[in-house]
Image: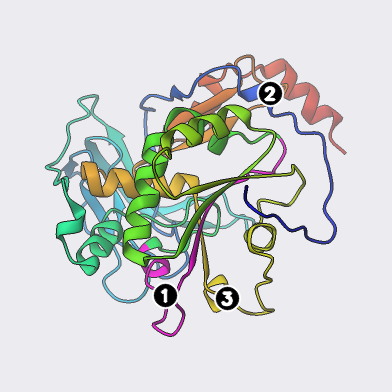
Amino acid sequence: MTQLWDFSGGIHPPEHKDISTARPIRNAGVPDYLVLPLQQHIGDPAEAIVEVGERVLKGQKLADVKTGMGVPVHAPTSGVIESVADFPVPHPSGMADRCITLKPDGEDQWCQRNPVKDYRSLERDQVLHIIRDAGISGMGGAGFPTNIKLRPPRDRKVSTLILNGAECEPYITADDMTMREKADEVVAGLKIMAWILRPERCVIGIEDNKPEAIAALRKATEGTQTEIAVVPTKYPSGGEKQLIQILTGMEVPSGGIPADIGVMCQNIGTAVAVAQAVLEGTPLISRVVTITGEAVREPGNFEALIGTPIEHLLEQAGVNQDAVSRLVLAAP
């Protein structure tokens, strides 16, 4: 049994997670248009490498970072480039940012993909390049380019690799449902990252309010040395520094990073994206998102193409406009 520690503070807000776990992950489908921000990660924004009016294929690279830190952006489906212009983006600033607008053509035609059957036959730098070229940045919220994170400084050996499946925020269940339904892909991505880093210990941390996910990952890790650490449910156990303290007893130094104490954290969604990029040749063109609350009739989790308007997702979940109106009227 994995030894656990505690961190000071923390709260126990109402979870409301059962609202969105009654249904399996649903495909959100293809919306009428996709808006792809070119700044989808920490670092430099990508620059468009396509022209307005150009037809592109699903998975085709649309924008790239020529110099500096960043990752490319890909077409989530086939279609025609309608514009490369400033567009409102979901950012606290409320400002617009450079985006590519893609009009789907309904054919969903893939570009050529290059899956790798045995990544262990490649050099580590080659696998890191595949991850970078697939456009993967941290799926847990920070958005740090994954290939750079997987290349820590030479003087900071990663001895513990943590996969963060705590998902402590109320309402949100995207990681929970991903672990339940895609446990094998989660573990496959973890194995790839572990092969790159060669840590002494691999551990998946999951809060104890996710029994189905715990069971799925226990089964998927049978015969491996990966630990499944079940941690007490408390917010913010899913915070990177808090989860590291729970699982290792060590604190990340103020102003430092986990690699300073020999630890690295990766998100559940990031692990799936890494597995798909390497083993299937599929770039990051979708992610699982939770649509939940009293204003939708069919709350749940959706596999949504990157760039999908929130209006489309609300329609898929059966948005109740009357309930939305009541909520707006009741807002302070």
Q: Which of marks 1 and 2 is nearer the N terminus?
A: 2
**Left or right: residue 238 compared with residue 26:** right
Circle 2: residue type: Asp
Residue under numbered circle 3: 261
Closest to the observer: 314 or 332?
314
Give the residues drawn in magenta, as a range: 147-170
Q: Is residue 158 above or below residue 79?
A: below
Task: Please identify the quarter of the rendering in which residue 64 is found.
Answer: bottom left
Q: Which label is found at residue 40?
A: none
In the image, residue 236 sits, relative to residue 150, either above or below, namely above
Which label is found at residue 152? 1
Q: Nearer the viewer, mark 1 or mark 3?
A: 3
Q: Is residue 315 left or right of residue 240?
A: left
Which numbered mark, 2 or 3, is in the foreground of this view?
3
Q: Which mark is residue 18?
A: 2
Residue drawn where x is 25% and y is 58% of the image: 133
1 or 2: mark nearer the eye = 1
What amino acid is at disc 3? Answer: Ile
Image quadrant assignment for residue 18 = top right
Would residue 32 be visible to someone looking at this image? yes
Quarter of the C terminus within the rendering: top right
Could you tell whether 167 is left or right of 59 in the image?
right
Sequence-wise, the earlier of marks 1 and 3 is: 1
Percent from the top left, x then y, of residue 77? 27, 35
Front residue of this view, candidates 28 and 22: 22
Judge left or right: residue 19 versus residue 59: right
Give the distance between the C-alpha atoms of the residues marked 2 and 3, in whole angstroms.
36 Å
Label 1 CA crowd tier, 10 Å (few <14, some 14–19, many 20+): some
Residue 41 lies within the magenta run: no
Query: Quick one: SS at disc 3?
Result: helix
